[in-house]
Amino acid sequence: MKEYMLIFRNYQAAFDSLAPAELDQVLAEFLRWNEALRAEDRLVELGRLSRDPGHTLRKDSAGVVTLDGPYAEAREAIGGYYRIRAQDIEELRALAGRCPVLQYGGVVEVREVADP
């Protein structure tokens, strides 16, 4: 079975506009999706990124330079990720298609994890 990264983009603004009760509903949807992936032995790892914009490291003639932020536009910001198992891209599409982010205007970028 292959492993894939699901990278979530473009959903934070939609979540920010939700009332607390609506946000609770979204979180419940994520918990149900998490539990379904765990029950199917598909979930390897998951994580949510903080609102800190992060940093970018680059090397120049003076050495390693730390820059503020990844310089992605806010609408392109990464909010979280899942690493899941699937037999192939078709099965992955079915699993990822149930992601609650998609219901709120978010995007799920999919990347296959290379074998070590």
Image: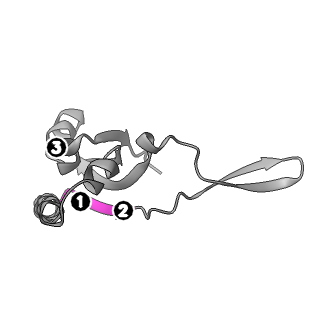
Is the residue under label 2 in contact with that under label 1 (CB below 8 Å)?
Answer: no
Left or right of residue 102, residue 50 in this image: right
Judge by depth and name the residue closer to the eye, 114 or 20. Answer: 20
The local crowd at label 2, few if under 14, some if 14 to 19, many if 20 or more residues have their Cα within 10 Å, is few
Question: Is label 1 or label 2 in front?
Answer: 2
User: Mark number for residue 103?
Assistant: 3
Q: Please tell me whether residue 51 is drawn above or below residue 90 in the rendered image.
A: below
Left or right of residue 5, residue 31 in this image: left
Q: Residue at x 23, y 59 (%)?
A: 43
Residue type marked 3? Gln
Q: Is residue 43 magenta?
A: yes
Q: Residue at x 35, y 39 (%)?
A: 109
Left or right of residue 108, residue 63 in this image: right
Mark 2 residue element: strand
User: Mark number for residue 48?
Assistant: 2
- Write down the residue under mark 1: 43
Q: Give the magenta range.
A: 41-48
Mark 3 residue element: helix
